[in-house]
Image (cartoon, helix red, strand yellow):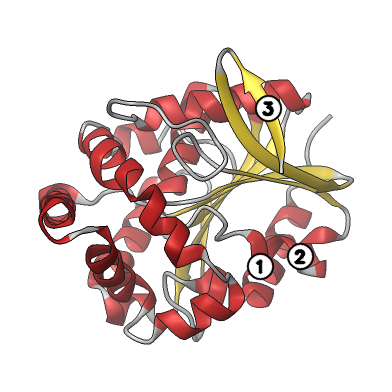
């Protein structure tokens, strides 16, 4: 990956292709989760694709202290400036969806449209308490055990063989990067607010994506999806059959086709 040095911060990134840019923001733990998606021809044809490792992950700068959603949004804005991207489509998965929404609030002129893949929003206190318990368990039992449970709840009990086949080494890297999530990002997410008032300020076209098996795996996914559809002023929803929160590993072709169709309807204004 290339390295962007941004006021003392280094972000590892890759960019490929030409056309309207699409920037992808990954969620917790698995920094390369978008890698299967960006090789799909549905997206690769006619777009410039940018993936990067957020602060604290893999090849990017690791720093002490809590990491806030707003800080990650500012990092992404700095990367866009470094790359000379003035306006882009944005895709955020899980926690990355929260970062994408914050960037749209802070710098709406940068965002043509948003695709939110089961974003970490509207979680409520029960969700934050569950994350805090995971943080405590990671200190007590070790990251590997807790990450395994974390991914089983979101990707399904049988997630590991597919993950190891599609993204070899990603679980081991997640263990290395675990302190970023458990010790830095969870506190920052707990301090972040995004409610219906903020949602009304997101005027760009938004695609809210739900895995067809996600609601059964954890009802919070379906609840969040329905709340996005009722809160965002310019939103459409889609359900991708046969996948859950691990959709980027389970069926990247279906996700790529869904995103490509949406972005073709909303070309970047010049």
Residue 51 visible, this orientation: yes
Q: Is residue 217 left or right of residue 102?
A: left
Horizontal and vertical percent position of residue 32: 57, 57
Horizontal and vertical percent position of residue 47: 83, 50
Rate crowding at label 3 as few (under 14), some (14 to 19) or many (20 or more) other CA atoms within 10 Å: some
Q: CA distance from mark 3 to mark 1?
A: 23 Å
Question: Which image quadrant for residue 76?
Answer: top right
Residue that numbered label 1 is attached to: 36
Residue that numbered label 2 is attached to: 39
The foreground one among 152 and 128 is 152
The foreground one among 187 and 264 is 187
Q: CA distance from mark 2 to mark 3?
A: 22 Å
Q: Secondary structure at mark 3?
A: strand
Q: Are marks 2 and 3 in contact (CB under 8 Å)?
A: no
Rate crowding at label 2 as few (under 14), some (14 to 19) or many (20 or more) other CA atoms within 10 Å: some
Which mark is on residue 4?
Answer: 3
**Quarter containing the C terminus:** top right
**Quarter containing the N terminus:** top right
Q: Secondary structure at mark 2?
A: loop
What residue is drawn where x is 72% and y is 60%?
A: 38
Badge count: 3
Q: CA distance from mark 1 to mark 2?
A: 6 Å
Horizontal and vertical percent position of residue 94: 41, 54
What residue is drawn where x is 48% and y is 34%?
A: 55
Residue 28 visible, this orientation: no
Q: Are marks 1 and 2 in contact (CB under 8 Å)?
A: yes
Question: Which image quadrant for residue 63?
Answer: top left
Rate crowding at label 1 as few (under 14), some (14 to 19) or many (20 or more) other CA atoms within 10 Å: some
Horizontal and vertical percent position of residue 61: 50, 30
Between disc 3 and disc 1, the foreground one is 3
Which mark is on residue 255?
Answer: none
Q: Which comes before the other along the chain, label 2 or label 3? A: 3
């Amino acid at each position: 990956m290339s390295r962007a040095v941004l006021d003392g911060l280094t972000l590892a990134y890759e960019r490929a292709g030409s056309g309207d840019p699409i920037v992808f923001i990954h969620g917790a733990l698995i920094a390369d989760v978008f890698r299967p998606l960006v090789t799909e021809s549905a997206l690769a044809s006619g777009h410039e694709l940018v993936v990067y490792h957020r602060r604290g992950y893999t090849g990017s700068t690791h720093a002490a202290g809590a990491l806030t959603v707003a800080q990650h949004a500012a990092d992404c804005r700095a990367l866009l400036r470094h790359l000379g991207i003035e306006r882009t489509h944005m895709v955020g998965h899980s926690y990355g969806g929260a970062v994408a929404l914050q960037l749209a609030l802070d710098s709406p002129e940068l965002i043509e449209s948003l695709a939110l893949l089961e974003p970490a929003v509207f979680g409520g206190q029960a969700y934050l308490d569950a994350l805090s318990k995971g943080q405590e368990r990671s200190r007590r039992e070790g990251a590997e055990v807790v990450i395994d449970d974390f991914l089983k709840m979101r990707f399904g009990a049988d997630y590991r063989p597919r993950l190891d086949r599609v993204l070899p080494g990603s679980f081991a890297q997640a263990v290395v990067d675990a302190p970023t999530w458990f010790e830095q990002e969870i506190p920052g997410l707990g301090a972040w607010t995004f409610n219906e008032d903020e949602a009304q300020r997101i005027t760009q076209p938004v695609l809210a994506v739900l895995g067809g098996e996600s609601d059964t795996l954890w009802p919070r996914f379906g609840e969040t999806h329905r709340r996005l559809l009722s809160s965002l002023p310019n939103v459409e929803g889609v359900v991708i059959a046969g996948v859950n929160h691990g959709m980027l590993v389970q069926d990247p072709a279906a996700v790529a086709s869904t995103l490509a169709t949406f972005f073709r309807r909303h070309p970047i204004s010049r």
